[in-house]
Image (cartoon, rainbow, N blue to C red):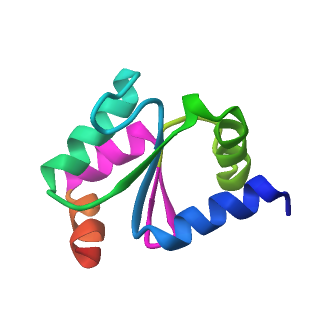
Amino acid sequence: MSDIQKKIGRQIEENPIILYMKGSKEMPQCGFSAQVVNILNYYKVDYETVDVLSDPEIRQGVKDYSQWPTLPQLYVNGNFVGGCDICTEMHLNGELGEILEGDA
């Protein structure tokens, strides 16, 4: 396992809710990232973000880590939840709220 994979693993382990995204929760840099931030803010949960634009190794590393090709990527309690489309669908059908409230 590479150092970047170990770093990502530690970040996911240390943060119950973490979003790998373009930009920050205060200033998302793409519409997909902004949408997931808005969904998380709706639930009023504490979460951390990692700006993949500021670190190309993390940007590629998180895709390799999850075996998922796109960003943003949401992890809850160490589990990969999904990207924007999956998070949106899970939000609309109530699944994401159940996962997040189980953590909160």
Which of these two is toward me, 103 or 67?
A: 103
Q: Is residue 45 left or right of 24 when viewed as pictured? A: left
Extreme right residue here?
1
At 31% across and 30% down in the image, what residue appears? 34
Looking at the rendering, in which quadrant would you find the N terminus? bottom right
Identify the residue at image location x=20%, y=59%.
94
Residue plotted at (28% across, 59% down): 96
In the picture as drawn, the residue positioned furthest to the top comes out as: 30
Picture coordinates of residue 83, whole percent (x, y): 46, 42
Residue 42 painted magenta: no
Image location of residue 39, percent across then percent down: 23, 44
Q: Quadrant of residue 33?
A: top left
User: What range is drawn magenta here?
Assistant: 74-93
Instruction: From the top left corner, tell me how far across and down residue 17 is, in percent.
Output: 38, 62
Q: Is residue 92 magenta?
A: yes
Q: Quadrant of the C terminus?
A: bottom left
Give the image quarter of residue 12.
bottom right
Q: How many marks?
A: 0
Q: Residue 31, percent across and down?
A: 35, 22
Residue 47 is left or right of residue 61, and the answer is left
Residue at 85%, 57% in the rendered image: 2
Q: Residue furthest bottom?
A: 102
Between 46 and 101, the residue placed more toward the observer is: 46
